[in-house]
Amino acid sequence: AAAIIMAKIYMKQKQWQLGLTKCEEIINQSPHTLLANYNDVFDPFNEYNAEIIWSLDFAKDIEGIFDPAFPGRSFAGNNSWRPSMFNPRLRDEPKNSDERDALGAALAARGEAFNGTGLQVASKDFAAKFPLNDKRRELNIVDNYLGFDLVFPYMAKFWNLELDRSPRFNHSDNRMVFRLGDVYLMAAECENELNGPTAKALNYMHAIRKRAYDDQADWDITGVNQQEFREAMYDERKWELAAECHRRYDLIRWGILLDVVQNLEYRFWQPNVNIKPYHVKLPIPLQELELNPALLESDPTNNGYR
């Protein structure tokens, strides 16, 4: 996990050789391996599989936790309303409101319910452009469940809808942070930036794409130039790592955050309207400014946030 953080920092600094060396240290020396099947990486019954390098580990039925953000409410579990935000479940469905009772009955028959804030796919672009023949699509775009069309597409890669094993606000489901699939794509990017789309860069990229497509004609990108490989990486990391909290930092590293966010169409909220150029950085935290007001002397605007 520490090596991944180091590699990401090197990549942000454009120290591509140091980043590649750290990625290959993980690939070649760690006990982790890529799973043959993408869906298996997110199996809630196998949360410690060989591809996952680091997760936040949650347990069910740990009592006695009080959260001051919700006075008057008690929460079973280890502050486990937080993992509930990362454990999507259906809500405000189906698309045809007359079928709500029928879908509710179908859910109940499976030990599931309308009982949470689902991870809905906010970007219309993501759902519209996700390749139809990409086997990762079924875990990233769910617009029909149990035969019922849904109001919004959901992202099911972190789903655990079982009420008995994963009740709301009392989840045992871990929150994935780092996995080896990410490292393979990082290594491919570093090699391409150093030497172009060499056999090494293609091998790292193809290791991820092979499990996403059945036909070689679909996964093989041999023949691209350096810029085409770079642009292929923009999409590959989007499809492979959706909702794993890497996208914003990728777009910042590539220098395209503002352009990408402004040119997407969203279902709710308006990040494309609200984003500003200074959002590529964060403000200095208030507590740091209180400890040392001199931090504002060189930039009274606090990077545009004041």
Image: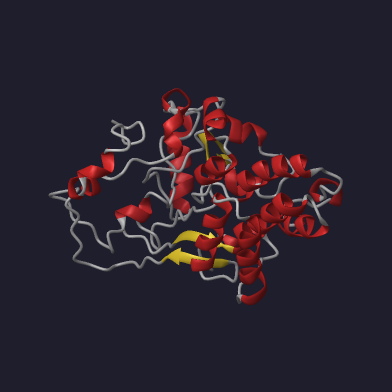
Residue at the top extreme of this rendering: 273
Q: How is the image coloured?
A: secondary structure
Which one is in front, 15 or 108? 15
Which one is in front, 152 or 20? 20
- The count of marks equals 0
Answer whether residue 39 is visible to the viewer in this image: no
Residue 37 is situated, as x and y percent measured from the top left of the image, at 68, 61
Query: Position of 79 compared to 164: left or right?
Result: left
Which one is in front, 169 or 65? 65
Which one is in front, 170 or 193? 193
Up the image or down, 11 lies above or below 41; here it is above
Q: Quadrant of the C terminus?
A: top left
Q: Which residue is pictured at 63% across the width and 76% down the height?
A: 29
Up the image or down, 233 lies above or below 151; here it is below
Residue 98 is situated, as x and y percent measured from the top left of the image, at 46, 28
Q: Please tell me in which quadrant of the rendered image residue 63 appears.
A: bottom left
Q: Please tell me in which quadrant of the rendered image residue 19 appears.
A: bottom right
Residue 248 is situated, as x and y percent measured from the top left of the image, at 50, 42
Answer whether residue 170 is visible to the viewer in this image: yes
Residue 192 is situated, as x and y percent measured from the top left of the image, at 73, 51
Residue at the left extreme of this rendering: 72
Q: Which residue is pictured at 72% across the width and 53% down the height?
A: 194
Q: Which residue is pictured at 49% across the width and 49% down the height?
A: 245
Query: Position of 138 compared to 154: left or right?
Result: right
Query: Position of 180 compared to 292: left or right?
Result: right
